[in-house]
Amino acid sequence: MNSPSTVARQPISGIAQWHTCFRALLHDACAQSSQRLVLCAQDWRHWPLSETDVIQTLEQWLRPSVSMVILTHDFEALERLHPRFVAWRQRWDQYITGRKTIKPYQSETPCFTLSDQYAIWLTNPALFTGMAGSDRALYKQVAEQADEWLTHRAVNAFAANTLGL
């Protein structure tokens, strides 16, 4: 597959193609020194977050100036499904923020991934169909959606450590 920064826009049809686009986005974010990653989903079952190559790429991407935001309505499912990713996230808490969708919008939580230059938007997450690329119109649409959800439809959540009495 081409580097995401060289692909203006491509349709996604199926889980294998989505996984390829997701991994390409992470590699490109690392190569391009992206400052921010946003991961948003309602269902984390088929995300490859705990796979070794994904965690290694995220590890390479990390540096003091970056941030990652994870947006969902169900962090408990993320913890159950991706324990390796959650353990990695706990080590790097200072770079990774969790945002939980507020109740009125939980059933509408979109599925997208965004770096500084590339966007993936699954318009039908159940079938893994959507669009990916660096096309400015696609990027702008996903970035505006991300800002709307992060600013107006979510609150801080997903503490790396919980303190007990």
Image (tube, rainbow, N blue to C red):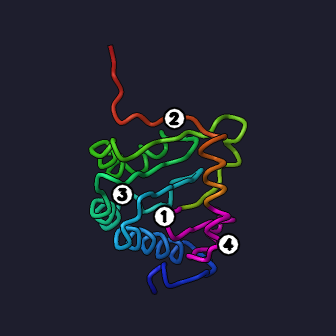
In the rendered image, which quarter contains the N terminus? bottom left
Return the residue at label 3: 50
Provide residue 93's location: percent of width, then percent of height: 33, 42
The correct choice, above or below, for 143 with respect to 20 in the image is above
Please tell me whether mark 1 sits on a helix, a strand or a loop: loop
Q: Nearer the viewer, residue 152 or 41?
A: 152
Secondary structure beneath label 4: helix
**Viewed as shown, does residue 128 lie left or right of 97?**
right
Question: Horizontal and vertical percent for residue 35?
Answer: 41, 59
- For label 2, the residue is 156
The amino acid sitting under disc 2 is Asn
Position of 57 with respect to 39 (left or right) is left
**Residue plotted at (33% across, 31% down):** 161
Q: Sequence-wise, which precedes: disc 4 or disc 1? A: 1
The magenta region covers 114-142
**Was residue 65 drawn as part of the magenta stretch in this picture?**
no
| Tag 4 near tag 1, CB within 8 Å | no
User: In the image, 59: left or right of 150?
Assistant: left
Task: Give how far apart the Cα atoms at labels 2 and 4 are.
Answer: 29 Å
Q: Label for residue 137?
A: 4
